[in-house]
Amino acid sequence: MKAVNIALPKGRLGEKVYEMLRNAGFKCPEINKSDRRLIFESDDGLLRYFWVKPSDVPIYVERGAADIGIAGKDILLEYNPDVYELLDLGIGKCRMAVAAKCDFRDSSERTLRVATKFTNIARNYYESKGRDIDIIKLNGSIELAPILGLSDVIVDIVETGTTLKENNLEPIETVVPISARLIANKASCKFFQEEIQNIHEALRTQCEEK
Ligand code: PRP
């Protein structure tokens, strides 16, 4: 029997999902023994786990290198991969928000300078509001941009709000709520229909028990 390949996002979220799958019976004790190895098979040979950079999960799933995976809604909205979204796991909750310096006053007469890693989400959001923006694509430490005058606002993930607060920024608008999703490759859903259905059910039950 062929194992179902699942791409888990490296980090706390992926570990939490592994715990859920372990509780549902897809055990793989080896997984806790190494933080360098990237591929692990469950004891029963039914699941093969890959640890993947979170933003790469949809690429593996879309191209079929992984049959299923766990990705944040932020990544799905940004890259719009051609995959099925099967389940909202209700974990990894945060929000995509617009934030600015506490004394920022917007003026619709000016083009708004927006720094972000999530250029598509930001563009779609402001387009829906009919607002002209100048996107400044950054890859990290986005909070620096308004402080140094590189941008007027940022569009970024806010979880506890601590990062904003510690940099004297404040959230001014919520763009969209975010949580982790189970996604699946379209062809794999036919080929592994029953197996994926079982994993889907197992995760759904684990979510409900939380
Ligand atoms: C995100 C985001 C903020 C931080 C917000 O970064 O870019 O910096 O989390 O969290 P808080 O509201 O709880 O302070 P993340 O840790 O995902 O890493 P990244 O900088 O690589 O995106």
Image (cartoon, rainbow, N blue to C red):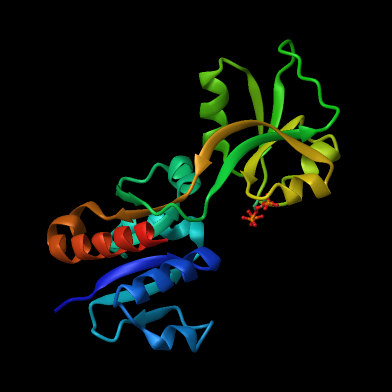
Point out residue 153 in the picture as x, y percentages from the top left corner.
Answer: 73, 32
Left or right of 202: which side holds 164? right
Residue 4 placement: quadrant: bottom left
In this rendering, the answer to whether 182 lies above or below 45 is above
* Residue at image point 37% right, 61% down: 209
In this rendering, the answer to whether 50 lies above or below 136 is below
Residue 132 placement: quadrant: top right
Image quarter hosting the C terminus: bottom left
Image quarter hosting the N terminus: bottom left
In this rendering, the answer to whether 161 lies above or below 100 is below
| Residue reaching furthest to the top | 109
- The tally of labels here is 0
| Residue reaching furthest to the front | 209
In this rendering, the answer to whether 168 lies above or below 39 is above
* Residue at image point 30% right, 77% down: 26
Point out residue 54 in the picture as x, y percentages from the top left corner.
Answer: 50, 60
